[in-house]
Image (tube, rainbow, N blue to C red):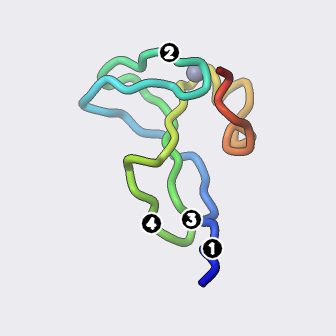
């Protein structure tokens, strides 16, 4: 069986826990708005959902989803 890739987009969220932007590695403080990857057609596990700070989102928008983390 071929695994179908899930189409995703970014949704604005706030978190009760500090999180980290996987693009710039900045810590996103509690309750600071940020963007979380979510499946459009299917559910993606929150552990594999990528998270981005608003700064990176403003720079790259949904293109972030097609870029690798800047290591
Ligand atoms: Zn960032």
In the rendered structure, the answer to whether residue 55 lies left or right of residue 38 reads right
Q: Quadrant of ligand 1?
A: top right
Query: Between marks 2 and 3, how big is the CA–CA gap?
Result: 26 Å
As helix, strand or loop, the secondary structure at mark 4 comes to loop
> Sequence order check: which comes first, mark 2 or mark 1?
1
Disc 4 Cβ-to-ligand 1 distance below 8 Å: no
Query: Between marks 4 and 1, how big is the CA–CA gap?
Result: 12 Å
> Sequence order check: which comes first, mark 1 or mark 3?
1
Disc 3 Cβ-to-ligand 1 distance below 8 Å: no
As helix, strand or loop, the secondary structure at mark 1 comes to loop
Residue 17: x, y in percent? 26, 28
> Sequence order check: which comes first, mark 4 or mark 1?
1
In the rendered structure, the answer to whether residue 67 lies left or right of residue 33 reads right
Identify the residue under disc 1.
4
Q: Is 44 above or below relative to 54?
A: below
Query: Residue visible at 56% across and 65% down?
Result: 40
Q: Nearer the viewer, residue 49 or 29?
A: 49
Q: Nearer the viewer, residue 5 or 43?
A: 5
Identify the residue under disc 2.
26
Identify the residue under disc 4.
43
> Sequence order check: which comes first, mark 4 or mark 2?
2
Are the two marked residues, 2 and 1, in contact with CB atoms closer than 8 angstroms? Answer: no
Q: Quadrant of residue 71?
A: top right
Q: Counting other residues with Cα less than 10 Å from the Cα at mark 2, is it few (<14), some (14-19), or many (20 or more)?
A: some
Query: Between marks 1 and 3, how big is the CA–CA gap?
Result: 13 Å
Disc 2 Cβ-to-ligand 1 distance below 8 Å: yes
> Sequence order check: which comes first, mark 2 or mark 3?
2
Which quadrant is the N terminus positioned in? Answer: bottom right
Residue 40 is labelled as: 3
In the rendered structure, the answer to whether residue 26 lies left or right of residue 69 reads left
* Tag in front: 4 or 1: 1
């Amino acid at each position: 069986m071929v695994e179908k890739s899930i189409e995703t987009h970014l949704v604005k969220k706030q978190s009760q826990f500090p999180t980290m932007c996987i693009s710039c590695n900045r810590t996103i403080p509690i309750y600071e708005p940020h963007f979380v990857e979510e499946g459009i057609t299917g559910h993606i596990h929150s552990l594999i959902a990528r998270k981005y700070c608003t700064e990176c989102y403003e720079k790259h928008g949904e293109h972030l989803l097609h870029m690798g983390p800047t290591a």
